[in-house]
């Protein structure tokens, strides 16, 4: 039985894309927590030792190899000899954050070139502007998302990523060009709709529709180098984000689980890039939000 469970775990890791998404989007639900199958491997290893089962231990080589192939590289340290050209920070600051000034100072302390924020609400927005103004003289805000930059910005527009069944005003994406020392970079900031896990499985239809719309905007982008920063309400393994991950590269190093802040289980705050490399991503200390901030190094090609 332990050997069979080991083989099934390996199958889920290698062939997770074959798990059907109906009913309840079970495939996406599995992919959201795919790295945690490593705990199943550890548990099976312990049971195999207790049972002194050579067959089970041998079978565990399959899921161990699969997990290492998928996620082992993320655990390797970044190359200190090759620092990134740009450092970016992504953070859903939470609409009920009681310390926006402290949050802004904490993000600036990481020394990024760009800071992307979501869930910016009118009472807190002046606080972020005032606190970040000295180090980040350039910024744009559209709806509830914003970008603060050390480098000049231009060409701001608002991609339409609103799902069809939302009728009220809803603006949760922006696009601008960042004029960096390494050339012009199109920067997108987005906040995709939330997902819910319940008795019926994963409710993600709005998120998936919004991801598809954002994917079309990225496909139409004429700038060669593009950075996407956002609370995408999904992990990079989740097939619901395929319209984005099929067009953009993700971090080569770092797990950086960002949600929920009290007990991070998944990274749903993402930094992706086209014609650039996301070298390493890491979680920053908690702020007044229910998300952890993430910081990443980006090197244009």
Image (spheres, grey):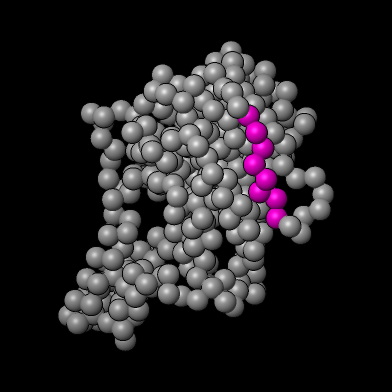
* Residue 93 shows in the view: no
Residue 272 image offset from top left, x and y in percent: 45, 43
Determine the image quadrant of residue 7. bottom left
**Quadrant, the C terminus:** top left
Q: Is residue 162 magenta?
A: yes
The stretch in magenta equals 156-163
Residue 213 horizontal side relative to residue 239, left or right: right
Q: Front-most of 185 and 83?
A: 185
Most extreme residue toward the top, as rendered? Answer: 134
* Residue 187 shows in the view: yes
Does the magenta stretch mainly form a helix, a strand or a loop?
loop
Position above or below: 74 against 4: above
Residue 56 image offset from top left, x and y in percent: 23, 80
Residue 102 horizontal side relative to residue 60, left or right: right
- At 42% from the left and 41% from the top, the residue drawn is 274
Q: Is residue 46 magenta?
A: no
Residue 76 image offset from top left, x and y in percent: 27, 45
**Number of callouts in the render?**
0
């Amino acid at each position: 039985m332990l050997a069979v469970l080991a083989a099934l775990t390996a199958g889920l890791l290698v062939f997770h894309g074959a798990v059907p998404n109906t009913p309840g989007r079970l495939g996406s639900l599995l992919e959201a927590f795919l790295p945690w199958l490593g705990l199943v491997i550890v548990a099976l290893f312990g049971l195999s030792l207790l049972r002194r089962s050579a067959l089970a231990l041998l079978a565990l080589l399959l899921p161990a190899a699969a997990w290492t192939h998928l996620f082992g590289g993320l655990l390797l340290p970044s190359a200190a000899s090759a620092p990134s050209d740009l450092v970016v920070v992504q953070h859903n600051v939470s609409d009920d954050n009681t310390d926006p000034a402290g949050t802004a100072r904490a993000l600036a302390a990481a020394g990024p070139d760009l800071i992307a924020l979501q869930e910016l609400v009118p009472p807190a927005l002046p606080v972020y502007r005032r606190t970040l103004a000295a180090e980040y003289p350039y910024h744009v805000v559209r709806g509830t998302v914003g970008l603060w930059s050390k480098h000049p910005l231009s060409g701001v527009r608002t991609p339409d990523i609103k799902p069809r069944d939302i009728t009220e005003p809803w603006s949760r994406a922006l696009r601008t060009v960042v004029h960096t020392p390494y050339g012009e970079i199109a920067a997108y900031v987005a906040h995709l709709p939330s997902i819910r896990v319940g008795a019926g499985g994963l409710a993600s239809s709005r998120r998936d529709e919004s991801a598809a719309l954002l994917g079309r905007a990225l496909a139409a982008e004429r700038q060669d180098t593009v950075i996407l920063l956002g609370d995408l309400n999904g992990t990079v393994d989740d097939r619901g984000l395929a319209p984005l991950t099929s067009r953009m590269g993700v971090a080569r190093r770092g797990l950086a689980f960002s949600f929920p802040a009290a007990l991070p289980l998944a990274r749903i705050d993402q930094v992706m890039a086209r014609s650039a490399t996301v070298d390493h991503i890491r979680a920053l200390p908690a702020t007044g939000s229910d998300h952890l901030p993430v910081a990443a190094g980006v090197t244009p090609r």
